Each structure stands twice: as C-alpha cells, then as structure tokens.
Image (tube, rainbow, N blue to C red):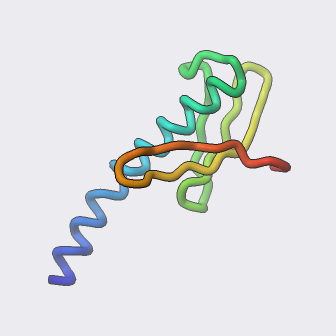
C-alpha cells in the first residue's frame, strides 16, 4: 500500500508543479503589465517558490494549489 501511495505522489507532483508555474506566470503578467510569454519563470529549491523576470521587472512569488484551485502571490521584500 505504501508503495502505491509513493507512486501516486511521484506522478502527481510534476502535474502540480506545472499548475503552480502557470498560476505564477499569470499573476506576474498581471502585476508586471506584461505578456505572460515574455516572462522567464524559474523554480526555486523551495517547492512553490518562483523567481520571475521580464519586461524590465523581477519578483519572487509563492504559489499553491488547494483543492485544484491554484494561485500565486508576489512576496514583498524579495
């Protein structure tokens, strides 16, 4: 049973990471007033933390998914 749970988690994490990055890109595009495809998004070693740059701006975001609803928020002071 434990092996099945580990396998399910291993398959789910990449899908969640993609959703987190998409939510981050969407929020940063709105914050930067910039097209999302012009942004460079790089994940941090901390899960759900992303560094975003583009259109002459940069910021650090924290993203999370709760019950399939993903969102990102710009971290102040970073």
Q: Quadrant of residue 46?
A: bottom right
Q: How many marks?
A: 0
- Is residue 52 found left or right of 78 in the rendered image? left
Give the residue drawn at x 52%, y 43%: 71
Relative to 52, is 17 above or below? Answer: below
Relative to 32, is 7 above or below? Answer: below
- Percent coordinates x, y for residue 47 in the rendering: 54, 59
- Percent coordinates x, y for residue 49 in the rendering: 61, 53
Relative to 24, is 64 above or below? Answer: below
Which residue lies most toward the right here?
77
- Is residue 76 found left or right of 51 in the rendered image? right
Give the residue drawn at x 73%, y 19%: 55
Q: Quadrant of residue 48?
A: bottom right
- Percent coordinates x, y for residue 51 in the rendering: 67, 43
Which residue lies most toward the bottom here?
2
Foreground of the two, 63 or 45: 63
- Percent coordinates x, y for residue 45 in the rendering: 60, 60
Give the residue drawn at x 62%, y 47%: 50
- Is residue 58 found left or right of 28 in the rendered image? right
Give the residue drawn at x 44%, y 51%: 65
């Amino acid at each position: 049973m434990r092996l099945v749970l580990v396998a399910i988690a291993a398959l789910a994490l990449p899908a969640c990471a993609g959703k987190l990055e998409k939510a981050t890109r969407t929020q940063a595009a709105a914050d930067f007033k910039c097209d999302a495809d012009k942004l460079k998004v790089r994940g941090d070693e901390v899960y759900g933390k992303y560094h975003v740059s583009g259109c002459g701006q940069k910021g650090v975001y924290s993203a999370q998914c709760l019950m399939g609803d993903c969102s990102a928020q710009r971290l102040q002071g970073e």
